[in-house]
Image (cartoon, grey):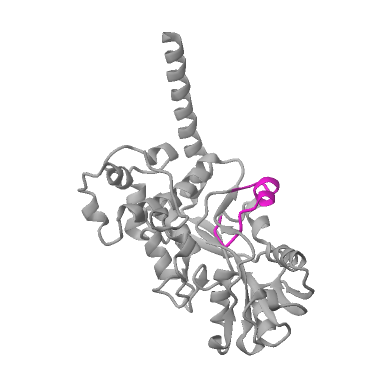
Amino acid sequence: MKKFLAAAIVAAATSICIGGAQAQTGLLAQIKTKGVLTCGVGPGLAGFGIPDAQGAWSGLDVDLCRAISAAIFNDPNKVKYIPLSSKDRFTALQSGEVDLLSRNTTWTMSRDTSLGLNFAGINYYDGQGFLVRKKLGVDSALKLAGASVCTQQGTTTELNLADFFRANKLKYEVVAFASADETIKAYESGRCDAFTTDASGLYAERLKLSVPADHIVLPEIISKEPLGPAVRHGDDNWLDIVKWTHNAMLNAEELGVTKANIDEMLKSDNPEIKRLVGTEGKFGEAVGLTTDWAYRIVKHVGNYGESFEKNVGQGSLLKIARGQNALWTKGGLQYAPPIR
């Protein structure tokens, strides 16, 4: 028994040493050296990743990049944003052009296993839907028999579209384009009867139309689209940092820790809050960060709920309900492992 315990202690110590070495020599060390996080984002999707007239980026996906920067540098603005099309996003990550991909990307088995990527979590539960003109007189996707449908190439959308019409024995014509902008412009010009993409994207793209109120999102959701950040295979420490940044934002919301009260929470006696804000334990040090890594995230960016409401929720132009993206304690799917 003593030999067994001794071996276990040695193994644990070795594991900690290896983890610490990885934290000092992997991608985190490179990012610290260059002084900036390079984040691959969408080319411009309202609510998720879009630049303003001054070139300042905002959105739910952008906030994750800002949160990681805050955890590393205690500054959410040390991020270089690289806008990437659906076609180019995986190549940019694989080649090392970006450190992280955070741009409405669906987690699928083939992407997870054959592209040399790791998904670090799901920051938005979505599903594919359809946008049509009200004057078309259609109130269900099941009434789109014979319709022409605009969609974007290089996405899961094309396959979902084919599956839906085949499963329901409906004929249709696909009209595909290379970019989201081309696709929505083609729809508005009348080149197709319907426009399909993730439901979140439908609400965002509808804002670009000359008269958004003339278009409706049909009720059917035809697919599962778990959207989340991805990193390259081969650096578990970096995967942990991205994963636990998202988890920290979720845990903060669940514990009621916000940008406004984070400093007051430093005095909390709640063990879970103490571990989150870094007044108990040294969880950040296990991945090469400081003990106050999660405090930095909430202080500079906020919790998950704050980011959601500001970017895509009731505080935004999109006004998307939390729905599946509510916390598990409120009937949603968002659930984070504990910091302990």
| Relative image position of residue 269 (x, y in whole percent) | 21, 44
Q: Does the magenta portion include 320?
A: no
In depth, the one of 257 and 283 nearer the eye is: 257
**Residues in magenta?**
101-118
Residue 192 visible to an observer of this rendering: yes
Q: Residue at x 31, y 42 (%)?
A: 275
Residue 56 position in % (x across, y down): 46, 71
Residue drawn at x 37%, y 54% as measured from the top left = 297
In the picture, measured across the screen, residue 166 lies left or right of residue 43, that is right
At horizontal 24% and vertical 44% (from top left) the residue drawn is 270
Toward the viewer: 313 or 75?
Answer: 313
Residue 29 visible from this viewpoint? no
Provide residue 93's location: percent of width, then percent of height.
62, 54
Q: Position of residue 340 (x, y in %)?
A: 36, 38
How many tags in the picture? 0
Residue 14 drawn above or below residue 259 = above
Query: Which quadrant of the view contains residue 42?
Result: bottom right
Residue at 24% x, 52% y is 265
Q: Quadrant of the N terminus?
A: top left
The question of residue 110 being in magenta is answered with yes
On the picture, is 74 further left or further right than 230?
A: left
